[in-house]
């Protein structure tokens, strides 16, 4: 009988510890998903109210073009500096600062009557998003190293949901309050909600951040993706799939309207593209994490995109819904790319270095997509050349993807 307390006490002590760890894991996951939810709302909300913003701030056509092109350029520019920040400060502290920039930028841009100030404050908001884009794969690697595919899928779906909510809810909110400023400004509240979840971790890391920064600087300094074939292949793969995605979001409604669809139905077709992408965003990372070799998956996704583009070129009206579904499945190469960023690095430091390089170069490349599609469409007055251009980009995506398909690591 005297042995029973010795058995029961450890068990009683273990249960609260297990519950505490489970609660901690849940809070970290919730905090990551809330950040991800904010990484696209600021962008899609502006697109929904661009006409009202142009009229309210008297934006010229050139300035409106700057506003619509800014996200990809900002992602490339500000994302490149994220490894520098991570070398000096712990990741939670960097993320809190990024979310603060997003809140401040979104709040200030709706309080101004100046077009120039609107652009500058939008850039401030986008800097927070760019840093969050780069940090998310690193946070997955740090906190869920054995669940990379699942967690990447969850946060990519959260990003998609945020983009959809931003696009769908912004106009009704603006109408309800009678101002486009309310429609854009409300998303600062959503970004503000993410900060308290990260503050405890940021404060906890404050005392140890200097020592961690020194160690992190040494580790990141050893990882130079720009000096490796893997780094450039990853950048081209990321850029090619992003280019296709931004071109599709920008121009598919026009293509379908030219094919005889009403504006409403063309919008529905674009909505189908987003809706189908949500479950694929959850499935694709988990599938990629289970496969040792990604050659077949990468070729299959690029092949589906090629089929969709050729279908839209040859039969844009008869097969419209089929082509949109096929394209959406093919474009799940985006969550695949996010997953591969973590799979091709051994460490969190390697992940953030590869993520920053691939996203910076990739988004610069992606910025050309809507511009070139629009140029080819304006030049020819038809969709044959734009669709052939996007087909060529899908081929480039496949070639670059094959170079990152084999298991290897950026640190090596």
Image (cartoon, rainbow, N blue to C red):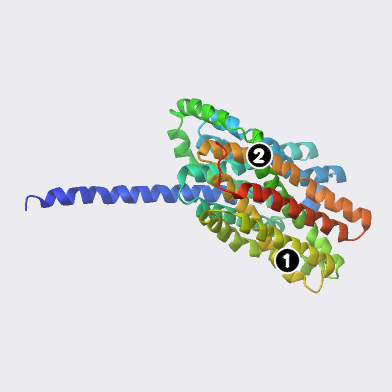
Mark nearest the camera among 2 and 1 is 2
When the figure is inspected, residue 1 is found, relative to residue 112, above or below; the finding is below
Report, in whole angstroms, how far the alpha carbon at label 2 lies from the one at label 1: 33 Å
- Whether label 2 touches label 1, CB < 8 Å: no
Q: Is residue 110 visible?
A: no
Which of the image's four quarters has the C terminus? top right
Q: Which mark is residue 229?
A: 2
At 45% from the left and 49% from the top, the residue drawn is 146
The image quarter in which residue 276 lies:
bottom right
Q: Where's residue 262, x and y in %? A: 82, 69
**Left or right relative to 131: residue 44:** right
Residue lying at the far bottom in this picture: please name it. Answer: 318
Q: Secondary structure at mark 2?
A: helix
Crowd tier of the residue under label 2, counting other residues whose Cα lies within 10 Å: few below 14, some 14–19, many 20 or above: few
- Which residue is tagged 1? 324
At 64% from the left and 39% from the top, the residue drawn is 231
Residue lying at the far right in this picture: please name it. Answer: 380
Q: Where's residue 105, x and y in %? A: 66, 39
Crowd tier of the residue under label 1, counting other residues whose Cα lies within 10 Å: few below 14, some 14–19, many 20 or above: many
Q: Where's residue 167, x and y in %? A: 69, 57
Give 111 or 59, whichever is nearer the viewer.
59
At 65% from the left and 64% from the top, the residue drawn is 275
At 43% from the left and 51% from the top, the residue drawn is 26
The image quarter in which residue 395 lies:
bottom right
């Amino acid at each position: 009988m005297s042995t029973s307390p010795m058995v029961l006490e450890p068990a009683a002590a273990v249960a609260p510890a297990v519950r505490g760890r489970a609660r901690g894991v849940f809070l970290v996951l919730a905090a990551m998903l809330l950040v991800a939810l904010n990484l696209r709302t600021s962008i899609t909300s502006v697109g929904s109210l661009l006409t009202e913003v142009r009229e309210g701030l008297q934006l010229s056509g050139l300035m409106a073009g700057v506003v619509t092109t800014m996200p990809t350029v900002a992602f490339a520019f500000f994302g490149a500096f994220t490894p520098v920040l991570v070398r000096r400060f712990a990741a939670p502290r960097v993320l809190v600062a990024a979310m603060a920039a997003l809140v401040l930028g979104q709040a200030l841009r709706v309080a101004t009557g100046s077009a120039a100030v609107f652009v500058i404050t939008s850039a401030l908001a986008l800097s927070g998003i760019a840093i969050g884009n780069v940090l998310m794969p690193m946070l997955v690697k740090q906190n869920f190293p054995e669940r990379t595919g699942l967690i990447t899928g969850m946060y990519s779906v959260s990003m998609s949901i945020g983009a959809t909510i931003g696009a769908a809810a912004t106009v009704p909110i603006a109408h309800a309050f009678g101002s486009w400023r309310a429609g854009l400004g409300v998303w600062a509240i959503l970004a503000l909600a993410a900060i308290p979840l990260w503050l405890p971790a940021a404060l906890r890391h404050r005392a140890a951040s200097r020592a961690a920064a020194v160690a992190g600087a040494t580790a990141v300094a050893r990882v130079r993706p720009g000096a490796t074939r893997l780094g450039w292949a990853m950048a081209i793969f990321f850029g090619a799939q992003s280019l296709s995605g931004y071109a599709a979001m920008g121009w598919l409604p026009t293509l379908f309207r030219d094919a005889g669809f009403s504006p409403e139905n063309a919008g529905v077709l674009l909505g189908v593209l987003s809706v189908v992408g949500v479950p694929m965003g959850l499935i694709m990372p988990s599938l990629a994490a289970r496969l040792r070799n990604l050659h077949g998956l990468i070729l299959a996704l690029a092949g589906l995109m090629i089929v969709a583009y050729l279908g839209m070129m040859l039969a844009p009206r008869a097969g419209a819904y089929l082509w949109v579904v096929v394209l959406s499945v093919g474009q799940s190469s985006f969550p695949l790319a996010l997953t591969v960023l973590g799979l091709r690095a051994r460490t969190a430091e390697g992940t953030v270095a590869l993520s920053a390089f691939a996203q910076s170069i990739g988004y610069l490349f992606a910025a050309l997509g809507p511009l070139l599609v629009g140029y080819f469409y304006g030049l020819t007055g038809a969709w044959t050349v734009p669709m052939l251009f996007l087909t060529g980009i899908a081929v480039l995506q496949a070639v670059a993807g094959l170079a990152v398909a084999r298991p290897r690591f950026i640190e090596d």
